[in-house]
Structure formats: C-alpha cells, structure tokens
Image (cartoon, grey):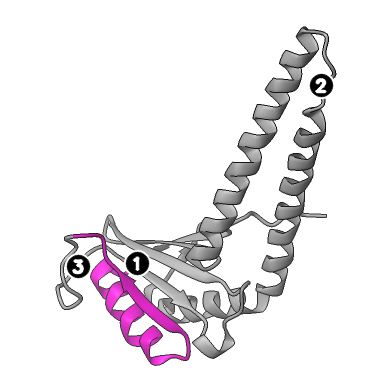
Amino acid sequence: MPTIPLRPKFEMTLACPSTVVLQRLCERLEAGPQTLRRTRVPGGGGNESVRERDFFVLTVPEEAQRVWSPWLTIEVTPADAGAHLFARFGPHPTVWTGFAFFYLILSVTFLFCLAFAAALLTTGAQPWSLGISAGALVLMVVMWWISQVGQRLAHDQMETLRSELLDAVKDCALTQES
C-alpha cells in the first residue's frame, strides 16, 4: 500500500513574472468559493504594496471545514524571468501543532524509557520501562495511521484546492516539478 506523506507538496515553475502571478492569484482565488488569506511576516509591508514574493493560505469555505480539512500554503518567489510556486497541504495550524507536540512527547518518552531500560539491564534489574517504550511506539504508529485516514477523508477537498490554484495560474504556461 503506497503511503501518503504527512504534508503533501508540489512545486511549479511559471513563465509569468512573480508580480503577475501574485496578481492573478489574488484576483481569481478571492473571487472563488475558497478562502484566500495573505500571510505576512512581521514588517512585511501592507497588502497594497507591490511585492515580488508573497505567501498565501487557501482553505475550503468555512461551512465545509472539518477537523481533517486541508489548508494549502502557497509561496510565490521570483525565478529567472518567471516565478516559482511552492505549495504544501497541511491541516489547520492548531491540529498540526497538537499533532507535532504529541509526536514529540511520545518520541521523548520512547527514547527515555528505552535508555532507562538499558540502564536497568546493566544493573541486572527488570527492564520494566520497555513496556512504556512499546506503548509510546504503538501510539506513534496509531497517530501516523490517523493522519493517513485524515488525508484520505480530505482528498476531495485537497483536489479542489489544487485545481483552483492551477486554474488561477494556468495562463502562465506552468511546468509541474513535483
């Protein structure tokens, strides 16, 4: 069974300059049913300023959003005479943060209990912490499985977001990279 990456991504090289790509994204995606948000780093200027590089988040309409609904983060940067577009799917930031934090806690627990079991074995004691390590490993596998189920549930929404993005930049003679 093929696996789906935790956060699928794709990249494109576009023939249009990045300022034109940004303008088309704003015009076409803001008019559609999906929600387009511009994101700014601190000190990144106002939305009205002309920029060659920008970041966006494209989501399904609020009434269609579920826990597993994807967010498509888009980065547009200048590249030679055209532009480079990088897009990555992910869950809502709070879901992703919770997932990453829980994975970190389980990983630390797994490694700590494994090291503790090794120390107990060297002293001749019973390595009781191996059970906790095994439990943490099982929970990590369960979390991975849940992420795969969530991506399968979100597949139609991911395809919708991807097709909306591709339609917005189709006039720029794009070449798909990955």
Of the image marks 3 and 2, the number of the one nearer the N terminus? 3
Give the Cα separation between the discs numbered 1 and 2.
61 Å
Residue drawn 40% across the image and 84% down it: 29
Circle 3 sits in a helix, a strand or a loop, which is it? loop
Give the Cα separation between the discs numbered 3 and 1.
17 Å
Image coordinates for residue 2, horizontal then vertical, percent: 77, 54
Image coordinates for residue 16, horizontal then vertical, percent: 31, 70
Residues 160 and 37: in front is 37
Q: Quadrant of the C terminus?
A: bottom right
Q: Amino acid at mark 2?
A: Pro
Q: Residues within 10 Å of mark 2 (few under 14, many from 20)?
A: some
Image coordinates for residue 90, horizontal then vertical, percent: 54, 63
Residues 20 and 72: in front is 72
**1 vs 2, front mark:** 2
Side of 24 relative to 170 (left or right): left
Label annotation for residue 102: none
In the image, residue 28 sits, relative to residue 93, either above or below, namely: below
Judged from this view, the residue extending furthest toward the front is 125
Residue drawn 74% across the image and 65% down it: 149
Side of 89 relative to 145 (left or right): left
**3 vs 2, front mark:** 2
Image coordinates for residue 4, horizontal then vertical, percent: 69, 57
Q: Which residue is mark 1?
A: 15
Residues 47 and 142: in front is 142
Q: Amino acid at mark 3?
A: Arg
Label annotation for residue 51: 3
**Which range of residues does the magenta coloring cover?**
14-42
